[in-house]
Amino acid sequence: LDSFQRRLVMNLVALGRAMRRKVIMPKMTCWCDRYWWLLEDCRFPGVSRDVHPMPFHCPFDHLYDLEKWVHSPVPFREYSFLDNPRIADADRHDELHLHVRGAPQGAQLVNASRVVTLDAGANYAAAARAVRESSTPDAFVVKVDARALELLCEDIGDPAANREFNGIIHTVLGVAEQIRYCDRRANTWFDAKRGAYDQMRNPINCTWGFHRPPPLPEKPQQRCRTAAAD
C-alpha cells in the first residue's frame, strides 16, 4: 500500500507538470513511524498498538526528504493549503473536476460544466489539453481522485518530457531513497549481552525502506502503462 501511495504521488506530480500547475499534496498515510534509532513493531520503543494504531496520518517528511523537494523544480503545496484562511472563498470553491471513465463519480460532481471526462488510458498531456479546452480552464483548483489518477496513462506525452521528469524525480528521491527504518527484529544483536554492539561487526540494519516508483517511459510506447495495470 505504501509503495502504491508513493507511485500515485509521483503520477500526481507528473500530471501537475503536464498541466503547468502546482500540486496540492494529498494527506500522507504511514504504516511505520519514523525514528532515528530502533523501532519496535514499527513504533517508537515502548509505545503500544492501542496508543499508536496503524496506519496513521503522518507529516510529509516521514516519507520524503522535504529539503530535496523544496529545492527542486517540483512546485507543490501542503495538503491543508485550501484550508488556509488567506485563500479566498471564491478561489477555494473554484473547482474543475477531472473524471476518468471507470472511476467512481462522486455525488459532488453535479455541475457538468465543472467536470472534464477522459477515457481510461488517456495520458497526462491529454488531461492537460482537456482542461485547457474546458469551459473553465483557469479554475483555481483542478481536482482528481486517486482512482481516476490510477487509470490515467503514466506518460506526459513525449519521451523527452518523460526523460526530463525522471531526472527531476531522481534528484528528489535520491540514489536509493532517503527514508530508511531500523527495526529491532532486523537487529538481533540489540538483545544480546551488554557490549555486543560494535559498529564494524554488527552495523545497524536500516535496510527497511521504499521501492522507487517506476520511471515514465523514455521511448515511444505501443501500449500505455497505468498504475492500475500493475
Image (cartoon, helix red, strand yellow):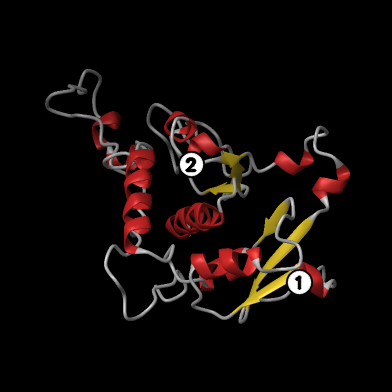
> Circle 2 sits on which residue?
74
Q: Which residue is drawn at 57% across and 41% down?
A: 76
Q: Which residue is drawn at 78% across and 35% down?
A: 84
- Residue 213 in the figure: left or right of residue 104: left
Snapshot quadrant of residue 157: bottom left
- Residue 54 in the figure: left or right of residue 42: right
Mark 2 to mark 1 CA distance (whole Å)? 29 Å
Element marked by disc 1: loop
Q: Which residue is drawn at 44% across and 62% down?
A: 156
Q: Which of marks 2 and 1 is in front?
A: 2
Whole-percent x and y of residue 107? 81, 72
Snapshot quadrant of residue 158: bottom left
Q: Which of 182 and 101 is in front in this view?
A: 101
**Type of amino acid at the residue the image marks with label 1:** Gly
**Which mark is drawn over residue 106?**
1
- The crowd level at tag 2 (other Cα within 10 Å; few <14, some 14-19, many 20+) is many
